[in-house]
Amino acid sequence: FRPEIASEVSEALNVLNRVFGYDAFRGEQQEIIEHVISGGDALVLMPTGGGKSLCYQIPALVRSGVGVVISPLIALMQDQVDALTTAGVRAGFLNSTQDFEQRREVEQAFLAGELDLLYLAPERLRVEATTRLLDQGKISLFAIDEAHCVSQWGHDFRPDYLMLSELHERWPDVPRIALTATATEATHAEIATRLNLTEAKHFVASFDRPNIQYRIVPKDNPQKQLLDLLRNEHEGDAGIVYCLSRNSVEKTAEFLVKNGIPAVPYHAGLDSRVRAKNQSRFLREDGLIVVATIAFGMGIDKPDVRFVAHLDLPKSVEGYYQETGRAGRDGLPSTAWLAYGLQDVVQQRKMIDTSEGDLAHRRRLSAHLDAMLALCETVECRRVQLLNYFGQAATPCGNCDTCLNPPESWDGTIAAQKLLSTVYRLQHERRQKFGAGQIIDILLGKTTPKVTQFDHDKLSVFGIGTELRDTEWRGVIRQLLARQLLAVEGDYGTLVLTEDSAEVLGRRREVPLRREPERASRPSRSSR
Ligand code: ADP
Ligand code: ZN
């Protein structure tokens, strides 16, 4: 027992009150902070908004020396340092946006022991001058923020993060704390191995965000659906709307503005000054909406984001959870709303098929997409599915769309057989390639020019599916895709059978399906 540690621990609470102005620690903050203060390594998994920053900022202030924070969020370093400076913390950063003079100033403050915290972009460590600089000062700890960036399996891989395993070799006595808001069990283990954190204590907070209501709806007219959501439930609220492409970001922002809703675009193709301006407007103004690609949001700390809407299907559950986690950091009721359709699946399959990288890489992307589809088509509680995905147990939440409006299920076995045999006829008997639209026209018995051109009205399956509407058939196709009973490939979204299709066609497997909810019905809100 070292008495000086006990006094350092009470110093932590003192710093929390005095410097940051908070009364008490949240969740596991205190245990984490005590562990790092006493020199231990830590791996912290905490959802967005959980309060990760204090877990390294306070130990850095209590321990002697400078806390070195590795962060990929270069665009936010200035803001972070400004906020700390306002609170009276001596902080600086080193990254590629600075000129020589600015860098030198920070380096000298570091050497003179005039800094409490130094933020570093990971690529700085590739520069020998930086490591030499660090050798000449006194380091109190290394914090590795957004630690999931080290995972090649993850969705945010940064090669420079791989070098961070060397920190321990070079500075064996300096404690390290790695933090992330996103990690499945596999990623979690990968972070520990790759960062050489085998001795670290793991702190895993619950990933549940009970104040966020998760809702996933079939997409038909996404802009209109979004507008309804905003007008009916989020009038005057701040929020983030995610789109996949820069083009749809611009179009959607224009559409909202035209409809009298204040919105600004954000994507990597915009001039950096415009981006910075839109970001800071979002942070400072009330009720502004940012329409963005996923380039927006990492590290953004705005407590009153009331909704996060996705107009396109996210590429992974990890990404989706991280993006939706930006809603409701203040703990008040918030909405995570996603519209997705068959076209999303077609488009993402195509992107995967044409992506660079080896087969293993494409398989990973595919597995990510499949997990996302399974979440979309579940008849269970969304939250249970999400938490299970991150390896945490849960019971139905009563505050997601499937809990509030339990989807009816129906026996879709015959519908699935009709659909799959139509695909079989085209794929195997005629060796033709067609997507969902044509297959549905055949099932519905529509004599469109394209149907007659290919003699599809002569097929035995022509018109055998009139018991369902067009949108219902789309729902059937989506669900079959989500269960890998059907697959989509190529540029035009050709539907093809899978190995498992045979079980349905051979009547060896039943196919319970989820009924498409009526348009415009929405779950009622318990509080608001
Ligand atoms: P994360 O990095 O985990 O997303 P932050 O560190 O940005 O979360 O913290 C989220 C918000 O919660 C911040 O506004 C922060 O100041 C606040 N916060 C963190 N810890 C506490 C605490 N113990 N008491 C009150 N507010 C806190
Ligand atoms: Zn639920």
Image: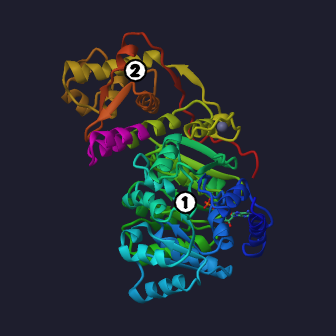
Q: What is the tally of numbered marks visible in this picture?
A: 2
Q: Mark 2, residues whose alpha carbon is within 10 Å: few (<14), some, or many (≥20)?
A: many
Tell me which amino acid carries mark 2.
Gly
In front: 171, or 299?
171
- As helix, strand or loop, the secondary structure at mark 2 comes to loop
Residue 390 lies, with reference to residue 131, above or below; the image says above
Q: Nearer the viewer, mark 1 or mark 2?
A: 1
User: Quadrant location of the N terminus?
Assistant: bottom right
Residue lying at the far front in this picture: please name it: 1
Residue 401 lies, with reference to residue 285, above or below; the image says above
Q: Is residue 59 magenta?
A: no
In front: 361, or 282?
361
In front: 432, or 174?
174
x, y percent for residue 178: 55, 57
User: Can see residue 255?
Assistant: no
Tell me which amino acid carries mark 1.
Ile
Residue at point 57%, 35% (across, down) = 518
Please state the extent of the stretch shown in magenta in the rendering.
346-369
Residue 508: which numbered mark, if any?
Answer: none
The residue where tag 2 is placed is 465
x, y percent for residue 234: 64, 57
Chief secondary structure of the magenta portion: helix
The answer to which image quadrant residue 272 occupies is bottom left
The residue where tag 1 is placed is 240
The answer to which image quadrant residue 437 occupies is top left
Q: Mark 1, residues whose alpha carbon is within 10 Å: few (<14), some, or many (≥20)?
A: many
Q: Is residue 366 magenta?
A: yes
Label 2 residue near ligand 2, CB within 8 Å = no
On screen, residue 340 versus residue 129, left or right, reads: right
User: Can see residue 483?
Assistant: yes
Residue 91 lies, with reference to residue 389, above or below; the image says below
